[in-house]
Amino acid sequence: MQKRKSRPDSFKKDAVRRLLARGSKPVTEIAKELGVSPSMLHRWRERFEPELTGGAQPSQGEREEIERLRSELRDVKAENTLLKKVAALFAKEVK
């Protein structure tokens, strides 16, 4: 059986700061970089985010909505990139 690794609170808080400032980087990628599971990172976020952000916390529903909107934004950006490439191809054919 593998022994659980105990991390200091400073490490956990730094991980949460990194998670909050991640931009469009997926949680799974940040967790992999830190050597922890995504679920562990989420638990640390629930524990330390109020302290790090001054207490104003979005509700679970708001967090889910934010995550859904981020995902939708990534999809729209990908579609936009594809449409730009297609438009460039059609522009070359017209000439």
Image (cartoon, rainbow, N blue to C red):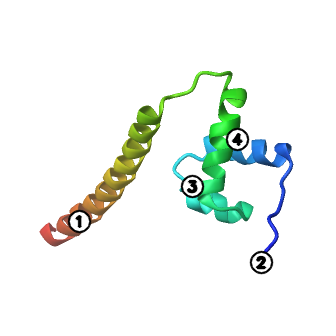
C-beta proximity under 8 Å, tags 3 and 2: no
Q: Give whichever of discs 2 and 4 has the lower sequence position.
A: 2
- The answer to which of 26 and 78 lies nearer the viewer is 26
Amino acid bearing label 4: Arg
C-beta proximity under 8 Å, tags 1 and 2: no
Left/right placement of residue 88 relative to residue 12 reads left
Q: From the viewer's perspective, is the residue at label 4 or at label 1 nearer? A: 4
Q: Give whichever of discs 1 and 2 has the lower sequence position.
A: 2
Q: Which residue is mark 3?
A: 27
C-beta proximity under 8 Å, tags 4 and 1: no
Q: Which residue is mark 2?
A: 1
Q: Point out residue 22 in the picture as x, y percentages from the top left corner.
A: 60, 47
Give the quadrant of residue 49: top right
Q: Which residue is mark 4?
A: 17
Q: CA distance from mark 3 to mark 1?
A: 31 Å
Amino acid bearing label 2: Met
Q: CA distance from mark 2 to mark 4?
A: 31 Å
User: SS at mark 4?
Assistant: helix
Left/right placement of residue 38 relative to residue 33 reads left
